[in-house]
Image: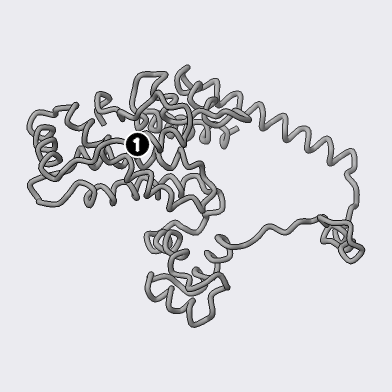
Amino acid sequence: MNNAFALPVPLTVGSLDSYIHAVNCLPILSAEEEFKLARKYRAREDIEAAHKLVLSHLRVVVSIARGYMGYGLPQADLIQEGNIGLMKAVKRFDPERGVRLVSFAIHWIKAEIHEFVLRNWRLVKVATTKAQRKLFFNLRSMKPGFDSLTPAEIDSVAGALGVKPEEVVEMETRLYGQDVSLESSSDDEDDRFAPIAYLSDPGIGPAQILEADENERMNASGLETALASLDDRSRRIIEARWLREKDTATLHDLAREYGVSAERIRQIEAKALAKMKSIMSAA
């Protein structure tokens, strides 16, 4: 994507709530205004026209991103990815087809958010096919209630989405399985037999301690080697995005720092991670 076509998000706001308030205050274009701007962009790549189209639809991205809050990912990152999808939609939008931009853009916005969720949600290991992705993103809305699916409901979902019943069961377990506390959260006498009481504690011997220390040292050494193989910009992006304990940088933070688009930062990040993985695997 052309770097000149960078997202014109209001950058003076200081928080996510402020950003959402700001984009909700942006004017909505009429169909006539929208088609006029789209024709200007297609005819002579008028970046200002594209900016106006993007700005008027940022609220749509916020609305769609809210639907993916159940996956435990930061709302700001979901919105950023959706904004990238919106920009791709504006670039490809053909006003002569007679449909509004919002109808066309929804597909691109959701596609970017879907890919982001699948890349970053650590529990997702089964969503490797198109049918399984449909299952991952539609199971929540297809469940008739909060209880576990019955055998008949499992068969119905599997048939509707073209997956195996056992895949429906596994995905439901991953999405709705609850963490179990090992220790009791109260002083009640009846709670003294928490799960931790049934776990053996053989203790850790010197050999295990040495082995753990050595593994940690090797992992740290491999990471340092992999980071050292990157150019300065790629290393800065990886450290800011992945190696901070707090205040991690977003794609747009780094895009502003380097004067490029968030899409370009993501491409650099993906290439750097792949290179690091290759080096660490060979170590």
214 or 184, nearer to the observer: 184
Q: Residue at x 27, y 41 (%)?
A: 57
What is the three-letter code of the residue carrying label 1? Val
67 or 166, nearer to the observer: 67
Q: Which residue is mark 1?
A: 23
- Residue 111 in the image: x percent, y percent? 34, 49
Q: Residue at x 48, y 70 (%)?
A: 143
User: Please, is residue 256 above or below residue 85 in the view?
Assistant: above
- Residue 80 in the image: x percent, y percent? 40, 37
User: Please, is residue 202 above or below residue 255 in the view?
Assistant: below
Q: Quadrant of residue 142?
A: bottom left
User: Please, is residue 185 above or below residue 78 in the view?
Assistant: below
Q: Is residue 73 left or right of residue 89?
A: right
Instruction: Give the quadrant of the N terminus.
Output: top left
Q: Is residue 101 left or right of residue 208?
A: left
- Report the residue that reaches farthest toward the top: 232
Q: Residue at x 47, y 30 (%)?
A: 250
How many numbered callouts?
1
- Residue 16 in the image: x percent, y percent? 46, 35
Q: Quadrant of residue 224?
A: top right
User: Please, is residue 1 above or below residue 82 in the view?
Assistant: above
Instruction: Give the quadrant of the C terminus.
Output: top right
70 or 120, nearer to the observer: 70
Q: Classify 10 Å Cα crowding around label 1: few (below 14), some (14-19), many (20 and above).
A: some
Q: Is residue 126 left or right of residue 256?
A: right
- Residue 64 in the image: x percent, y percent? 37, 49
